[in-house]
Image (tube, grey):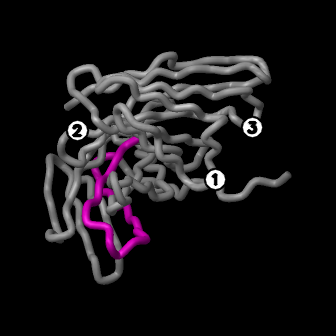
Amino acid sequence: GAVVSQHPSWVICKSGTSVKIECRSLDFQATTMFWYRQFPKQSLMLMATSNEGSKATYEQGVEKDKFLINHASLTLSTLTVTSAHPEDSSFYICSGKTRSDTQYFGPGTRLTVL
Amino acid sequence: GESVGLHLPTLSVQEGDNSIINCAYSNSASDYFIWYKQESGKGPQFIIDIRSNMDKRQGQRVTVLLNKTVKHLSLQIAATQPGDSAVYFCAEMFDGGATNKLIFGTGTLLAVQP
């Protein structure tokens, strides 16, 4: 199957700082990438849909100015958590969509904000 | 404050037994369904999918059943092995406008006893 990577896999930062997470499709072109957030023992919650070369579409309740998404190429999308606070600590997962509707997920990034 | 909803439903089975994991989906307009397996600290891994024009699909050791009348999906795992221990999510896809969205269910923790 197609491979999606994320970097970093784990990050700890101080409250008030910004953190960038990268999502790459390694062996396919993803015109659409998705960003999810997952709290412990809970399901994945869709945050935003990112189409290459256009602005991301955010789900209701997700602050676009806090979670900046850039999808500059067919293989790379980035999520920047700006002015992070402890409540932003979570597991962030991206996925890339192939030409069919199949989504391939990255391994996730664990963010801990102190 | 007190948190709610932090306890995943758990299915405990003996190694070698068959497992059945159930899922109720929400949107009658959903036309594509996927089962994912998520191991601790990792991203979701595709297991099997089914489209709404089918009611059963089989893979290797896994079978997915779809009952559109009651909006119910199930995943059957034959001869369950310790390596099957994980959280299993069903996901439904429906037309989200420009891009189809994947919405995840709450998840079930499968614990395989040796």
Q: Secondary structure at mark 2?
A: loop
Q: Which residue is mark 1?
A: A61
Q: Which residue is mark 3?
A: A87
Task: Please tell me whether residue B108 is drawn above or below residue B29 in the rendered image.
Answer: above
Q: Secondary structure at mark 3?
A: helix
First in sequence, mark 3 or 1: give its number. Answer: 1
First in sequence, mark 1 or 2: give its number. Answer: 1
Mark pair 2, 3: CA separation: 32 Å
Residue furthest bottom as drawn: B69
Kind of residue sitting beneath label 3: Glu
- Foreground residue among B107 and B29: B29
Residue A98, labelled with which disc?
2
First in sequence, mark 2 or 3: give its number. Answer: 3
Residue furthest right as drawn: B1
Looking at the rendering, the stretch of residues picked out in magenta corresponds to B15-38
Kind of residue sitting beneath label 2: Thr
- Foreground residue among B73 and A89: A89
Residue drawn at x 32%, y 73% is B29
